[in-house]
Image (cartoon, rainbow, N blue to C red):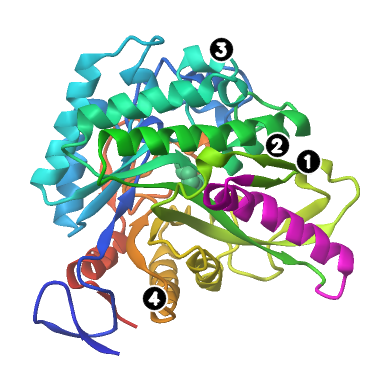
Amino acid sequence: MQGFGASGGRPSAGLTFPPGFLWGTATSAHQVEGDNTNNDWWAWEHQAGRIAQGHRSGRAGDWWRAAEADFDRMAALHQNAHRLSVEWSRLEPQPGRWDERALRRYREMLAGLRRRAITPMITLHHFTFPLWVARRGGWLWNAFPGAFGRFARRTVEALGDLADLWCTLNEPVAAIISGYLIGRFPPGGGGLLRTRVAVVNAVRAHAAAYHAIHAAQPAAQVGIAAYLRVFDPARPASRLDRLVAGAQDRVVNWMFLDALRDGVLRGLWQTVRIPESAGSLDFIGVNYYTRDLVRFDPRAVRTLFGRNTPTPGAPLSDGGYGEIYPVGLFRVLEQVRAYGRPIYITENGLPDADDDLRPAFLVSHLREAWRALQEGADIRGYFHWSLIDNFEWADGWTLRFGLIGMDPATQVRTPRPSSALYAEICRTGSVMI
Ligand code: IFM
């Protein structure tokens, strides 16, 4: 398709995205700020055996001190948006005690983004809990939704003049499954019953935050960043494979979003009415990475009786992170379109230290996003994960997601070739094919 890029007037042959489209990268506080000593992940990292190779977040990308140097890099790469998170444990280090200095630092960061013409999208909860919340039970604490709602209200009152795009929760279902079923995230296990309680509380917490944000800022746009993964039956002719793939798809991908649309949580062998969550999405954030083939296995209790593998022979990203499956982005966008809400692709990326896969990954996934746009999906932005290499949770520093390489020991940044490719896409608002 012929088109004119966002840079205005220069003709380009490629897939052109709508004017005003947000082009950027995504990060989260714990993964880039450094020295987040007052949250459950910091404590977790300091337990033996929790993180690959004993890695720790440490100084991370040093953003608490010097994020602005990376903001300059974003601007130089023509990015016009950035999704970041604020760290609850910094803002409210003790219950009800607010740290004004931390608030000022976030104000400074957001103003710094805006000065560079970079629109911020802010996530309020990206995996970490303040220690005082974690000690009371984290997702399981029955007063967590109320506490999170108050945190959201105070944060939006303090920062709302600098941002109006809010994600309440990042990947709540994936975080809870990783914490309570798989055990790779704190608290390291718990079982199915606790998983159910945690999911109900997460829906309530989102709803509390949704209403609190709108009370503080009526024009706010509020959504979640949902982890959406494609689950296909390993043997399409097998009824059991189809059944377990369908169950994983329902629980991981749609149960939560449906509850925010309908006010009823259906899944994990329960139906719970949560009326305050009905209609509580102004947009849907799509975090898409990969797909699994799912084979029935009666022993795989923690994964709903499915054993998951990549497609044999499919291209894989580093460290067994997953199959590269661009069409999956189109497939999930088509399903999200049915919710009738604006869509942001709030994360998409891969670990690829030598950058031999990232250029094709970028182009092929953006082609699928463009295809979904042509089908009528109201996609308003794309945030690549991530700007710089950052602390990849249980995988520590072993997986490198950055358009820009970053050595956590020296803090030296080394742009990967794909950063220039993405910069051109951001500059022109179109993808050359
Ligand atoms: O690094 C994570 C991010 O925190 C949440 N979504 C997936 C990313 C890559 O694994």
- Earlier in the chain: of badge 4 and badge 1, it is 1
Which mark's residue is nearer the viewer, 1 or 3? Answer: 3
Which mark's residue is nearer the viewer, 2 or 3? Answer: 3
Numbered mark located on residue 135 in the image = 3
Q: Amino acid at mark 3?
A: Arg
Q: Nearer the viewer, residue 366 or 148?
A: 148
Assess whether residue 101 is covered by the magenta stretch: no
Specify whether tag 3 is near ligand 1 (CB below 8 Å).
Answer: no
Q: How far apart are the alpha carbons under marks 4 and 1?
A: 36 Å
Residue that appears at 48% across and 12% down:
132
Residue 383: tell me if it is visible. yes
In contact (CB < 8 Å): disc 1 and disc 2:
yes
Q: Amino acid at mark 4?
A: Leu
State the residue position of label 4. 373
Asked which secondary structure carries label 4, the reply is helix
Asked which secondary structure carries label 3, the reply is helix
Q: Amino acid at mark 1?
A: Arg
- Residue range in magenta is 236-264
State the residue position of label 1. 302
- Earlier in the chain: of badge 4 and badge 3, it is 3
In contact (CB < 8 Å): disc 4 and disc 1:
no
Asked which secondary structure carries label 1, the reply is helix
Query: What main secondary structure does the magenta stretch of the protein show?
Result: helix
Looking at the image, which residue sits at the far right? 298
Q: Position of residue 39 (x, y in %)?
A: 45, 19
Q: Position of residue 268 (x, y in %)?
A: 75, 43
State the residue position of label 2. 182
In contact (CB < 8 Å): disc 4 and disc 3:
no
Q: How far apart are the alpha carbons under marks 1 and 2?
A: 7 Å
Q: Amino acid at mark 2?
A: Ile
